[in-house]
Image: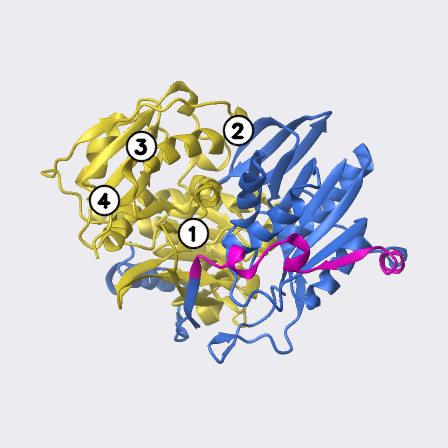
Amino acid sequence: MTRKVLVLGETRDGSLRNVSFEAIAAAKTVADGGEVIGVLIGENVSALGTELVQYGADRVVVVEGEKLKQYTSDGYAQALLAVIEKESPEGLVLGHTSQGKDLSPRIAAKLSSGLISDTTAVEVAGGNVVFTRPIYSGKAFEKKIVTDGLIFATVRPNNIAPLAKDESRSGEVASLSVEIKDLRAIIKEVVRKASEGVDLSEAKVVISGGRGVKSAEGFEPLKELANVLGGAVGASRGACDADYCDYSLQIGQTGKVVTPDLYIACGISGAIQHLAGMSNSKVIVAINKDPEANIFKVADYGIVGDLFEVVPLLTEEFKKLKVHS
Amino acid sequence: MNIYVLLKRTFDTEEKITISGGKINEDGAEFIINPYDEYAVEEAIQVRDSNGGEVTVISVGTEEAEKQLRTALAMGADKAVLINTEDDVENGDQFTTSKIIAEYLKDKEADLIIGGNVAIDGGSGQVGPRVAELLNIPYVTTITKLEIDGTNVTVTRDVEGDSEVIETSLPLLVTAQQGLNEPRYPSLPGIMKAKKKPLDELELDDLDLEEDDVEAKTKTIEIYLPPKKEAGKVLSGELNDQVKELVHLLHTEAKVV
């Protein structure tokens, strides 16, 4: 059965986020040969429509307006619901980002529909669209289907491979005029903290520090390594509790769940709560003084040693590799 | 101020997960208040202590959630309500739970509703915002700071590490992010007092809901454990050589850099 599926393209600092291309790939599966329609919401975002098409959308609907300059659940919900009303889709896919997490339940409640959040895979099996999602913070997985109404899901960044960009693809980018009514919650200020570097949830490489980092300054060598690898810095709860870093960096059962290609755990013992946040990473490297540390049980590669010796050496070695390649 | 907390009973974060009969095995497992809901309970108590009013903690689930509700009462909440769905709902989802909670809250004139931003078991983070939408009140998710001045509310929200300062007003639903506060442990007098605090138990009937009204829109068809990871390679030799080997392995064997 082919389906018409909408995908919300999420922008950040004027560009589309990778997760949007991943969401298009997921939407293609849900559509099962049907039409995939990208949706863009914001101010001056229509130029990004072409890119959604190049990544697999058949056409794009753009809702623009001054009140949509910044994300608010009120404003974006009105815009997206207007597109849904116009297009009557059978499927809807959003990224499981801060924005997607905030917006999707409102849309689902408004439409009295189901919503399968935080999915990591999608397939069509036996006539059903089957989503896979981690539960118990990745300690188990479930496969889930929608039994009634709209097939609505959010996709976790870094898990579903986007389609290859095809610059020869073309599709209509049309705007839809929507009158945005009262916004009941207004953003007064945005304080940038984490976004100096690469976004943790979308990073391909995460360098993470635990209690072994010993101080806020102790994170410096980790940051240098992250810079060389184009990665983001994370932390264990222990490091956050000890005030070595901000809680926004915390990876674990409470905190963020990350699935990068490469996770380097520095001075992290590997408590079960931490493993819940990173154990699904593709390749895990552990650096720890204690050869008995639990983290070595989930690591693909381990070095028993002092992170303050190992990490700078690693940084140098990766620099050499970058120069050579 | 009329404050409600949405609370879920979840597995202890230390618990290992096993599966029996296609379901998560709950035998012998320790249960706790979902850690994010604990922040919600704490925040509700603090808001009440500075603004006056009453804190009611609500949970949808089975009789066993009484224990976690009592803990919330021992922390300082005033009343608890358990909506027991054991006999009526076999396989609910977030649509089910939010519909039940909204039905309960619709005539309660709540000024402030606080929940955790996500439960550590199901991990969907849907119920709070869904409830707000059903009640037609604004919401702000993943908050790290809440300031109330009359009916004006200033909230700081965590957005993937950045912070947004948001102005909104009561009635309002917010969901708690880590860092909002430091939840207190129940004191001994608190535990004694909690035994005498009201804990009402309701069923769907009491809310004029039929089973069909709350029938799930989604269904779990399989639960499984992730494949066990093979033990990795711990390198040896001179530290310099180990580092060189590691970079080489990541480049050529794992191909991640």
Q: Which residues are magenta?
A: B191-218
Q: CA distance from mark 3 to mark 4?
A: 13 Å
**Amino acid type assigned to the residue bearing label 4 in the image:** Val
Q: Report which residue position mark 1 lands on.
A: A115
Q: Which residue is mark 2?
A: A191
**Mark 1 crowdedness (10 Å alpha carbons): few <14, some 14-19, many ≥20:** many
Is A149 positioned to the left or the right of B196 in the image? left
Give the Cα distance between marks 1 and 4.
18 Å
- Cβ–Cβ below 8 Å for labels 2 and 3? no
The numbered mark 2 sits on a residue in which chain?
A
Asked whether, in this view, residue A138 is left or right of residue B175, the answer is left
Please state which amino acid type lies under the numbered disc 3: Leu
Say yes or no: labels 2 and 3 on the same chain: yes
Q: Are marks 1 and 4 on the same chain?
A: yes
Place of residue A96 in the rendered image (x, y in percent of width and height, measured from the top left): 41, 47
- Mark 3 or 1 closer to N-term? 3
Query: Along the polypeptide, which appears first: circle 2 or circle 4?
Result: 4
Residue that mark 4 sits on: A36
Label 1 or label 2, whichever lies nearer to me, is 1
Which amino acid lies under the numbered mark 1 shown in the image of this protein?
Leu
Q: Assess disc 3: are there few (<14), some (14-19) or many (≥20) residues with their C-alpha within 10 Å of its C-alpha.
A: many
Q: Earlier in the sequence, mark 1 or mark 2?
A: 1
Q: Chain of mark 4?
A: A
**Chain A is shown in which shade?**
yellow
Judged from this view, the residue extending furthest toward the bottom is: B21
Q: Nearer the viewer, mark 2 or mark 4?
A: 4
